[in-house]
Image: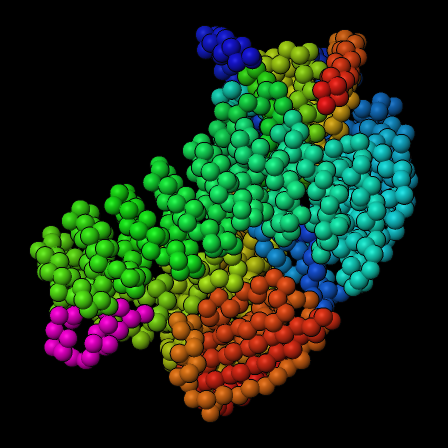
Amino acid sequence: MAQPFVKKDDDLDEEEEYSPFYGIEKGAVLQEARVFHDPQLDARRCSQVITKLLYLLNQGETFTKVEATEVFFAVTKLFQSKDTVLRRMVYLMIKELSPSADEVIIVTSSLMKDMNSKTDMYRANAIRVLCRITDSTLLTQIERYLKQAIVDKNPVVASAALVSGVHLLQTNSEIVKRWSNEVQEAVQSRAALVQFHALALLHQIRQNDRLAVSKLVTSLTKGSVRSPLAQCLLIRYTSQVIRESSMNTQAGERPFFDYLESCLRHKSEMVVFEAARAITELSGVTSRELTPAITVLQLFLSSSKPVLRFAAIRTLNKVASTHPLAVTNCNIDMESLISDQNRSIATLAITTLLKTGNESSVDRLMKQITNFMSDIADEFKIVVVEAIRSLCLKFPLKYRSMMNFLSNILREEGGFDYKKAIVDSIVILIRDIPDAKEIGLFHLCEFIEDCEFTYLSTQILHFLGNEGPKTSDPSKYIRYIYNRVILENATVRASAVSTLAKFGAMVDSLKPRIFVLLRRCLFDSDDEVRDRATLYLNTLVSDASVGGTDEDVKDFLFGPLDVPLVNLETSLRNYEASDIPFDITSVPKEVKSQPLAEKKAPGKKAIGLGAPPSGPTSVVDAYEKLLSSIPEFSSFGKLFKSCSPMELTEPETEYAVNVVKHIFDGHVVFQYNCTNTIPEQLLEKVTVFVDASEAEEFSEVLTKPLQSLPYDSPGQTFVAFEKPEGVPAIGKFSNLLKFVVKEVDPATGEADEEGVEDEYQLEDLEIVAADYMLKVGVSNFKNAWENLDPDNERIDEYGLGVKESLAETVSAVIDILGMQPCEGTEVVPNNSRSHTCLLSGIFIGNVKVLVRVSFGIDGSKQVAMKLAVRSEDPDISEKIHEIVAEG
Amino acid sequence: MIRRTLTERRRWIRFDPITTGTDYELSIGGRCANCRLDLVVPLPFALRISRMDCCPSIKNVLLLDSEGKRVAVKYYTDDWPTLAAKLAYEKSIFTKTLKTNARTEAEIAMLDGYIVVYKFIQDLHFFVTGGDDENELIIATVLQGFFDAVGLLLRNNVDKRSALENLDLILLCLDEIVDGGIVLETEASVIATKVAANSLDGATSLSEQTISQALATAREHLARSLLK
């Protein structure tokens, strides 16, 4: 109804382009600001000019330092005027300009006068402005007034002081903490928002004192909290207390639960929702506790307000991941939300339903979703596809309808990310549900017949090559694959050739026919395609001619590459620029980034189409280059491992330093990456003084200082240590950053001649056993395990004492050993009582190590661990046990 | 030598305490609201980490016109550090909400990990953004407070033109609703009175209007309870 109105207005705008600020210019307004200096102030005109200035600031215009200072000084003159409107605009303007330290002095006295004025509005605003620009010395001067203001009878003044207190607590906590008596009094205030602000401040003052927070909650939950906002806060604090107390008492009645439940009957929706959400988020919540919360959320689902529906469905969605059964009661309400106008709500409804759905409702649900899919954006579709994938893994028997659904949406319009999500899902379903394989492969074949994305085509062809030959009738896929050779671009043609060859190699009956097709590819216009065809023909056709057996050929052509692709890529890049022949054994085997595991279904080894891990390019390689460029380190031999950077400073300090440990056979090099975050400083002759008194086996051999470290451009300094060759020596090092500091004029960027020597304490660093372990995965753990001599196996059992959970223990052990988890065994399914984790790595001296750790947890959370180690050297196996025993 | 204090440049990090195992006495764990990583921080550090823990906070309040241009905006956090980032965010929420009908009831959306509640009237688009884990209804209450207060201040003649003509009132209104991310006041009539108490001409007529507004609200409430 309002629509035509708007249109008319718009037309009007276009004709006149009316705006009070039309054609406004900064320069002109700054000129106008001269009226502030008039001896006879025109209040109305002055506030208009301030409005214009604020308009400019609001539009993103910036003032130079000079301009801002000028305006600021002019504005302070306006304190002379008694006009209230003008005064408020002055306050706003000061806050926007946030003057620098030496200018503050100018306004402080005026503001302090206003703070004690009779007009409440002046007092409240003066407090807010003053607290915004104050520093600790000034704060002690005005503290007295602020304390008074907190208990002021005017709620606006009290709130202003309390809110300012919350902000000041971040910078001047000591001072604010002295106000707690006044704040305590304000909590009892009858004004709703004063109570809210007082409660927020009081809690923040006491947040580190658990007992005090608990007392606060105990007294307030008995009643007397009026405002809904304060009530919400109290609910949050209550659940915090519940969380903390549940850590101490293992079982028994949950304290304060009655309070949360009573809030579900509060008259304000805000409070009801906050309480419901708090209950659903309690750790280890029981279904009996959940029921009342779910009931109110269910009521919200049919509200007329989108915000309520959204809030409810979002919370239910979260609950559904952990307690799907508790949410099933709401299924009917949620189904009606699928057609909700608000697409966020609809998508949440769908995904929640998919989580709670039972086997019998799947078909109906799929039908509903099909209608829904056509009118939502791609990003929502991806969410739905992922939910369907999880559902299908939950109900494997229903694969048929879900496969059909996926193939249907695969044929529809959609962007790359969406299609990729679908294809990934199909691939995962094929891997996990054997029955779905043939139908899934068929859908994928159909898809590549008309696929506009080269990346997806090649990935599917690769997958087809691995899975297709193992099906009952491999020949039916050949047609689809060869079509690619005829119709597609060079990249797809090349991968189609490889896929054909795989069929040829694995399925003897198809061999002659495949060879015919491959021979045709020899006449392709693209080099890569011809090369591949030639290679495959020569190796496959005449088995013996190249040498080696049939097995060798297959291994050569299709065997797994036991180096991470990222590493290979960077090594090849380096090779392109050099004249040294490429050697695959020189490629580092350290795994840098975790493969993209399927997050939705932990415990499954499902990995999409093995997309190349984007993101981090080989860091290690960069290090190697960096180190080899420093002549002092060239004698150390080949770099064994570079650890990931470890911060030695807190974030956001003056100097940010992190360290990378480079491990060589007989040496260790610490690379300190330093960043100077102070624009007014230039650091010179930066070194790190390392105290190795707690690392007996190490002796410092050289230090490479950093000559100059300007603002915000990182630099490195190195310290090298000698250690016994091949021995995993451990030790602790304390670090002190030493440098000469020179002041820099920020305006000119020139540094002073004179410098002052200074030092800066850094955190300690340790060399631990894990630093001598390379993360190297194996593709088939079982084979690798059996290939190692059982005589070198060492088994021992450990009692680890009480632990919070298995998952945490497993990751702790992995961290101690610094090894690569294999076959997704680092993920521990929820609530499992035992778990076996497979680890592999290479220990210093190039010794391959495999570890099989079994964990068990009992009712009292006692964790026991059985550690079996196999390696190429029995001593190393012993060593691994030592590491664990010490860690 | 100028040493910057930690706090000056610290960004808001919100920690939700989680159990961190056996030695929680010595450390605090939490999930960082910005990067969604679980962190365990030794207690001496934890004490120094600023926490807006638990206090509802508003990230920004935006008033845009029908082309997505700014009428008045106010940001309370560093989530969007540069002007470009701010404008990009405004553009993104404007285009994504443009086609929705948020004229009768406030609508809600999740964008880039933020909750945005919005409402349109004439050629003005009101937005309030809160964090991912904020209570949606609190954000909605703030929006409603802002929306109604502007309605009162502009005497129900709410469109871009009159908003720009009374920009001082709008800016004061923003200033009275949220202070540094903390909700100051949500009751529209109170906000409007606080803003207008200063303007010499507005005081009387506004109080009348507050009464009529109160009546209207009462009527609305009655109608709704009957409908239920």
Looking at the picture, how far across and down is residue A567, in whole percent? 36, 66
Q: Extreme front residue here?
A: A360
Residue A555 magenta-highlighted:
yes
Q: With A884 as the anchor, is A538 left or right in this view?
A: left
Looking at the picture, how far across and down is residue A325, in whole percent? 64, 49
Name the image quarter holding residue A77: top right
Q: Which residues are magenta?
A: A539-561
Q: Is residue A555 above or below residue B155?
A: below
Q: Is residue A36 visible?
A: no
Residue A294 magenta-highlighted:
no
Q: Nearer the viewer, residue A572 or A736?
A: A572
Q: Residue at x 70, y 31 (%)?
A: B178
Q: Residue at x 68, y 37 (%)?
A: A298
Please state, as top left, top right, bottom left or bottom right, where the C terminus of chain A lies in the image.
bottom right
Please state, as top left, top right, bottom left or bottom right, where the N terminus of chain A lies in the image.
top right
Q: Extreme left residue here?
A: A523
Looking at the picture, how far across and down is residue A618, in whole percent? 39, 63
Q: Is residue B78 above or below residue A50?
A: below
